[in-house]
Amino acid sequence: MNTNHLKKFAQVARRKLLEQVGARLDFVLTTDSAELREKTEQLKQLRQELGRTTKEQLIEKVAYTWFNRLMALRFMDANDYQPLGIRIITPKDGYTIPELLDEAKRGNIPDELKVNRQKIFDLLDNRIPSANPQNEAYKELLIAACNHLNITFPFLFEKINDYTDLLLPDDLTSDFSIVKDVRDGMLIEDCKNVEIIGWLYQFYISEKKDEVFASKSAVKKEDIPAATQLFTPRWIVEYMVQNTVGKLWLQNRPGSRIREHMPYYIESVSGNSEDYLKLESIEELKLMDQACGSGHILVY
């Protein structure tokens, strides 16, 4: 897994999402259109949220929400985990548009998606005036797919029935879209490793972290996650568990064959506890964060 490639992708994607979500927010707040008049409740919620927080914080929150969802969709696509059996943001082999949109163009929309099928077919057949009918149709399908995944993953795909869908970037289907960036940034082979999710989160907040550390003022409450959260790679997880729980297990069951499955376990020759903690460098020891984070420490 090329972490340098992932870091560049995550940082560029964050900046792009912040810009596009911000532009969408300005448009929604200053434009009167037929589309927005149909979403008065979402607009009301949006203005209420702006009354509780700052514009910058709102944009940051929505940008990360969509990054998180698109990242998860790509990971599921790459590993054939989609409950619908259709890739949501990834094309079929040899194609260029997301399989979900391609199927809709062929007249196939999964029954599970709560979406106005006739509207989508009318858009794709140019029966409804639109500057970009394919993009508009895909936007409806993408939101419906996220809502459907709420059934399986409510902790990740919260129901999009508030202002969040209003701030989804406009461009979702061109070669310059954030969807295309996610596909290019998360290579199929890299998605075979679940650690990609943790790395992308750390890289996504890395520039924000640098900003917080560079500031001489006190850290704001909303900036604490960016300043303190780090992803713990698998090898460190294994080292920590093998030399704590694994060590305790072997002390009580010296003949256990579990030792054969603990490549990071450190045998203490002299019996000195300092030998047990010896590492290649002090920097490796600093990385051993005892926080559970995403929970993969607990799983291992």
Image (cartoon, helix red, strand yellow):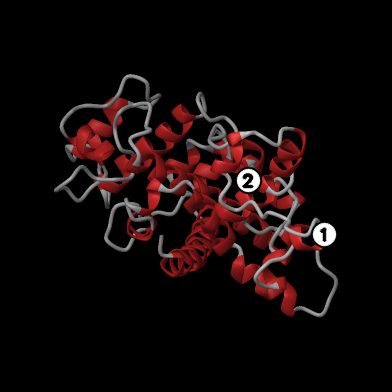
Q: Position of residue 40 (x, y in %)?
A: 56, 37
Q: Amino acid at mark 2?
A: Leu
**Left or right: 212 in relation to 86:** right
Furthest-right residue in view? 218
Quarter of the C terminus within the rendering: top right
Q: Position of residue 211 (x, y in %)?
A: 68, 75
Q: Mark 2 vs mark 1: which is more N-terminal? A: 2
Q: CA distance from mark 2 to mark 1?
A: 61 Å
Q: Position of residue 182 (x, y in %)?
A: 38, 56
Q: Amino acid at mark 1?
A: Asn
- Identify the mark at residue 272; answer none if there is no mark: 1
Q: Position of residue 178 (x, y in %)?
A: 39, 57
Disc tally is: 2
Q: Nearer the viewer, residue 263 or 134?
A: 263
Instruction: State the residue at coordinates (19%, 51%).
Output: 96
Q: Nearer the viewer, residue 36 or 16?
A: 16
Contact between marks 2 and 1 (CB within 8 A): the answer is no
- Identify the mark at residue 231; answer none if there is no mark: none
Circle 1 packing at 10 Å, graded few (<14), some (14-19), many (20+), is few
Instruction: State the residue at coordinates (72%, 40%).
Output: 245
Instruction: State the residue at coordinates (48%, 63%).
Output: 10
**Left or right: 104 in relation to 246:** left
Circle 2 packing at 10 Å, graded few (<14), some (14-19), many (20+), is many
Quarter of the N terminus within the rendering: bottom left
Residue at numbered disc 2: 46
Residue 4 makes an appearance in the image: yes
